[in-house]
Image: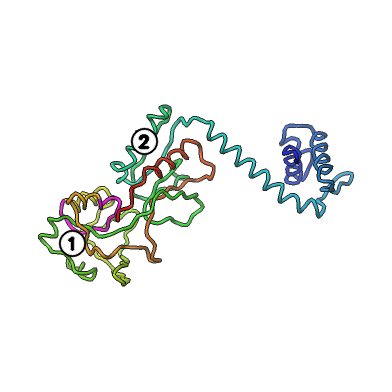
Amino acid sequence: MKSLWNIKAFCMVVERKSFVIAARALGVSPSAVTRAVQALENELNTLLLARSSRQFSLTPAGELYFESARQILHIQDAADEELSRLRATPRGWLRLAAPQILSCRILPEVLTELTLHYPELRFDIRYSDTTLDPVQEQLDLVIRGAFPIDSELIGYPLWHYRRHLYASPGYLTRHGQPANPEALNEHVILMHTAPRILRAWNFVGNGREITLNMRASHRLDNGLALLAAVEAGLGIARLSDWLAEPLVAQGRLCRVCGEFRLVSARGEDPQMHAVAAQRRLPARTRLLIDTLIAHRPIRPN
């Protein structure tokens, strides 16, 4: 089996284009790096570097082996990182942002469970329905709903859900149940305006696909306020099934045009997801993601 130290020394020499600079980066003498590369060549019984008095170049075998060697080191680093995460006790501040609706659904229970098991954890939370950037806002994690946005951020799916239209029993008693989506223009429509206003609503169901440009009767900038307004009987709104269906079961809301669901322009259902700026997450951040997934809502029928 090839020595990882020898492989690391070889890769460092190639990347830094110098035995001396590679030795400095590794914190050893140039002669130690030279011996490591020679030992690797002996193990492989192959010349990797063609040396002259002042410079070197990769041999064809060296070029081929260099790519594999880098992959070996990457796998080893990833394994070491995972072991470190297992050994580390999550502690310290975790700064995150989440939609306002999670301030009273799921997240309070998750945070309570985590602090019971890891009392050294500290949470700094911003509840906002606007699209926040974890880099600009200096956040470890941002939880978002709807659809992931193409970016350089690393995404972590939490749970999928569907959107339907809902209203209170009182509203439907006063205004009646619309027979189909086209009849919605005769009703009071409540629209969530954060992070942006989506006037085009795409309906799928009953063997049909319908796109309607909706005109809002009232606008609200967060999901918590929208849910409260629908439950109070102000109008009809597009809501997440994981949030609204438990209220339907309690008789506090009713699904409107129940055979239809609302999707993206590409026909996709939304998902709750988290985004971070880095792929190798601290143990406390990874723990929060895993616990949120464990507490994800049961998908309604």
- Residue under circle 1? 188
- The magenta segment: 232-245
Front in this rendered view, residue 117 or 165? 117
Q: Amino acid at mark 2?
A: Leu
Q: Position of residue 301 (x, y in %)?
A: 30, 56
Give yes or no for residue 239 being in the magenta stretch. Answer: yes
Is the residue 93 above or below the residue 143 in the image?
A: above
Quadrant assignment, res 146: bottom left
Name the mark nearer the viewer: 2 or 1: 2
Q: Are marks 2 and 1 in contact (CB under 8 Å)?
A: no
Q: Position of residue 300 (x, y in %)?
A: 30, 53
**Looking at the rendered structure, which numbered label has been put on residue 163?**
none
Q: Residue furthest top?
A: 119
Front in this rendered view, residue 74 or 214? 74
- Residue under circle 2? 111
Q: Residue at x 54, y 42 (%)?
A: 280
Quadrant assignment, res 294: top left
**Which sits earlier in the primary sequence, circle 2 or circle 1?**
2
Q: Position of residue 108 (x, y in %)?
A: 32, 38
Front in this rendered view, residue 289 or 223? 289
Is the residue 45 above or below the residue 150 in the image?
A: above
For label 1, the crowd category at 10 Å Cα-Cα, with few meaning under 14, some 14 to 19 and many 20 or more, is some
Relative placement, left or right, of 223 versus 47 is left
